[in-house]
Image (cartoon, helix red, strand yellow):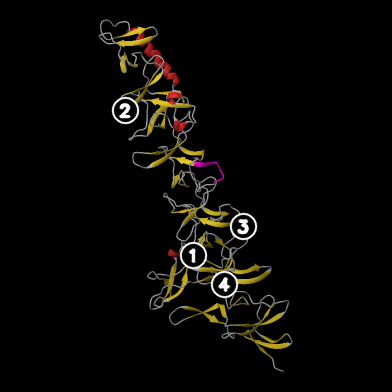
Amino acid sequence: MRKQTKLVAVLSATALFAIGASMTSFAATAHWEQEGEDWVYLDKDGDKVTDTWKKNGSHWFYLDSDGYMAKDTIIISGSNDDKYYVDANGAKVTNTWVSVDNADDHECSDQEDLTTLWYFFGSDGKAKKADASKKVFTGIPHGENMDKKDTFAFDEDGHMLTGWQDIELNSGKEYRYYFGSENEGWAYLGWQYLEKPEYDNFDDVNPFEDEAWFWFGTNGRAAQGTTKYINGEYYTFGASGAMNSKWISGTPGVSEVTATTAPGTAAHAFYTDSIGHRRTGWLYTWAPEDTDKEYNQYWYYLSNKGEAFNDDAKDTVVWAWDSDAGKYTEAKDYSGAKAVSVFKEDLFGDGTDAENVAAKVIKNKTFLFDDNGRMVTGLVQIEGGTGEFDDKEKIQRHVNRVGGKALIEGIYYFSTDDGSQEGAMATGKVTVSDEGDKYTYYFGKDGKAYTNTLIKGAIYGPDGKRIEAQYGSKYELVHVDAIYDADEVVKNADGSSARKLVKGLENGGLVVVNSNGTVKRNASKVEIDGVKYKVVDYKATPILE
């Protein structure tokens, strides 16, 4: 910034003119008098006036301890040791910036790295300086034509502050500002990409980078330890004021946030990208705990507030059988139910066999997320947890509905295919690969796999897999439990629905299947491993000869 040194010269010329026009008119009274190149002020007795201000015309002049008019120097005067500046012609300046070398009498030890120190002398001629009531000053003019007004800060000696400054206001609260270089000094506003303060811990941002993004309000104060809604987006700032650029936990919205941690139960998390604002919708990125971004990436789904969707036990829904209504209803007066768990061997390659999960419907498709917000893919087993039930023991099953779809206990498949459908819950017939082996499942409209069920000419066993002849055999004899017909239901006396057992397999038995999983319904003779069988209503019995 160019301070107004030119203005000093203008004022000085005016003052000189005023002195020259009037100083010869004094006689036999207190008056100005010239001694060589200096001016003095004599009282009515003809003695020099010292250590005081005298006015001539519209300008004030200072007489030093020897009685000579001071020129081009800083004057310390008054009970508060206020500072003033008189120009080369001795006139006190107002609304003027003045610079001095940071040496000798003007040396500032707190800013010893500065070669130049700046003062601003206000409308009363006093240098702005910090005191108990005020440390930051607004509306200070500057610029080529003094046409700009900004916020500046000064120390107790009147030196303009620069760079990073933590200033405790009279409210007792400390705020962080950035006042630019030694030839600027005004408080930066809005977004600024700056070198980090040397005296701070930057655990909330990349410690290997020397610079970071900061945001300053219209009062010049940096956003610190808070979340701000700026131009339609949420941004979060650490205690240092640096914009967060990774996972954090806290409460969505404009509020204070906690330290940078992985989100957990009842915690909210969001990710800020290189642009800084909270991400929404789908996001493929590293896990919160992977600060070095060295391991696998996962899919996350973030709300319009940046909250990562995850399992939250407080939202778990407990379902109870309502005998009057003949259906399951949400039990609002039960407590202690645990979140639903998903079981899959080494689900994420980290040795974990069970995870709490939550299902969510996104654009008419159902997705599953664990308690860290990671999208779950593959074949999973949903199993209800135990809870604290009432003495009637009405609780029949548990589901997890955390802001989304309720899943009852059973087997589900969430697609592992790349593309837009990755992670979506499957329905219908699906072939699943596992270490080179392929298995066929059939999932209902609710996503739950059929088990011990006959559907479209094939039987799906207790694990949901289609029963097939193995190892290249044309036919295979398999023992099954009681099998239900997917297309047949019956009504109970109370009006509820129940699945109907397949005729002939009400109590299970032997069935004949081929390599495509087709089960024989009736056959007069089928030979398997040298033994002949007769099949009636799916049930195979040996033919005794």
Residue located beneath label 4 in the image: 449
Numbered disc 2: secondary structure: loop
Whether residue 509 sits left or right of residue 186 in the image: it is right
> Residue 10 at x, y = what percent?
41, 16
Numbered disc 3: secondary structure: loop
Count residues near mark 1 (Cα–Cα under 10 Å), then give few for <14, some for 14-19, many for 20+: some
In the rendered image of this protein, does residue 454 appear above or below residue 232?
below
Q: How far is the residue under mark 3 from the one under mark 1?
A: 22 Å
Q: Is residue 299 visible?
A: yes
- Give, as a three-letter code, the residue at label 2: Asn
**Residue 419 shows which numbered tag?**
3
Numbered-mark total: 4
Residue drawn at x 27%, y 5% is: 27
**Residue 405 shows which numbered tag?**
1
Q: How far is the residue under mark 2 from the one under mark 4?
A: 85 Å
Do tag 2 and tag 1 residues touch (Cβ < 8 Å)?
A: no
**Residue 80 shows which numbered tag?**
2
